[in-house]
């Protein structure tokens, strides 16, 4: 019988000899975000690293392609890269740090309220809007699911046919067995800037046999 095995990323790193870095508690996520805000590791600064390491791997002049050799090879080919990335991320980190110092309790409360009240309501209303839109286009009835329906993975009904309406990010994070058979799946994406919602559906899914 086949066995499914998961190796945690930390164990992979340890197995290939990658050392842990030492940074102050809670700071990794802030550094990561600062790096992203600054686009510090963009290709113009550090090369397209995912491709660069393939060039290193295929370089016959490197004896063992070890971690130490990769660092030496990279620094020789891109001597200013890590400095450029560090300078950009450090500048942004300082900006973020100064802004974080301005955060007060009422800002945290506003964030929690937005998460618990607004985001939850918005998620429900997106489902409602999509279900109603499809039903209107098809000229059929629709309704949201009740608590019992939700227990069975049903968000609502279009022409009395059960549907699930989920964000594409939700779908990607769940295994296939999470989704029940016999329920029409409608996925949507939301534009991070405009908050516009995009989805597609097959009208044939809502034709009763």
Image (cartoon, rainbow, N blue to C red):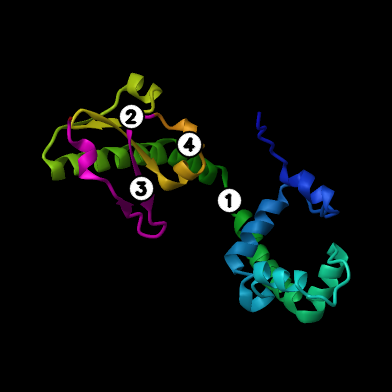
Q: Is residue 203 above or below residue 151?
A: below
Of marks 2 and 1, which one's residue comes earlier in the chain?
A: 1
**Residue 151 located within the stretch drawn in magenta:** no
The CA distance from mark 3 to mark 1 is 34 Å
Of marks 3 and 1, which one's residue comes earlier in the chain?
A: 1
Of marks 4 and 2, which one's residue comes earlier in the chain?
A: 4
The CA distance from mark 3 to mark 2 is 19 Å
Residue range in magenta is 181-208
- Asked which secondary structure carries label 1, the reply is loop
- Asked which secondary structure carries label 2, the reply is loop
Image mark for residue 176: 4
Category of crowding for the residue at label 4, using alpha-carbon neighbours closer than 10 angstroms: few (below 14), some (14–19), many (at least 20): few
Q: Quadrant of residue 30?
A: bottom right
The CA distance from mark 4 to mark 3 is 17 Å
Asked whether the beta carbons under mark 1 and mark 4 sit within 8 Å of each other, the answer is no
Residue at image mark 3: 188
Q: Is residue 26 above or below residue 84?
A: above
Image mark for residue 182: 2
Residue at image mark 1: 103
Of marks 1 and 4, which one's residue comes earlier in the chain?
A: 1
Q: Residue at x 42, y 57 (%)?
A: 192
Of marks 4 and 3, which one's residue comes earlier in the chain?
A: 4
Q: Position of residue 80 (x, y in %)?
A: 76, 80
């Amino acid at each position: 019988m086949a066995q499914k095995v998961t190796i945690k990323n930390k164990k992979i790193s340890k197995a290939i000899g990658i050392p842990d870095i030492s940074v102050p508690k809670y700071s990794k996520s802030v550094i990561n975000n600062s790096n992203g805000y600054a686009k510090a590791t963009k290709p113009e600064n550090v090369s397209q690293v995912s491709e660069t390491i393939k060039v290193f791997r295929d370089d016959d002049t490197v004896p063992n392609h070890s971690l130490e050799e990769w660092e030496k090879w990279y620094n020789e080919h891109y001597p200013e890269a890590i400095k450029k990335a560090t300078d950009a991320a450090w500048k942004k980190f300082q900006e973020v740090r100064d802004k974080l110092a301005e955060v007060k309790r009422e800002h945290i409360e506003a964030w929690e309220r937005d998460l618990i009240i607004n985001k939850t309501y918005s998620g429900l209303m997106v489902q409602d809007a999509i279900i109603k839109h499809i039903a209107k286009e098809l000229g059929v009835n629709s309704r949201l699911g009740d608590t019992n329906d939700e227990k069975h993975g049903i968000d609502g009904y279009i022409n009395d046919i059960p549907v699930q309406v989920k964000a594409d990010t939700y779908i990607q994070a769940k295994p296939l067995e999470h989704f029940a058979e016999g329920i029409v799946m409608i996925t949507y994406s939301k534009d991070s800037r405009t908050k516009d919602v995009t989805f597609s559906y097959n009208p044939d899914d809502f034709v009763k046999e």
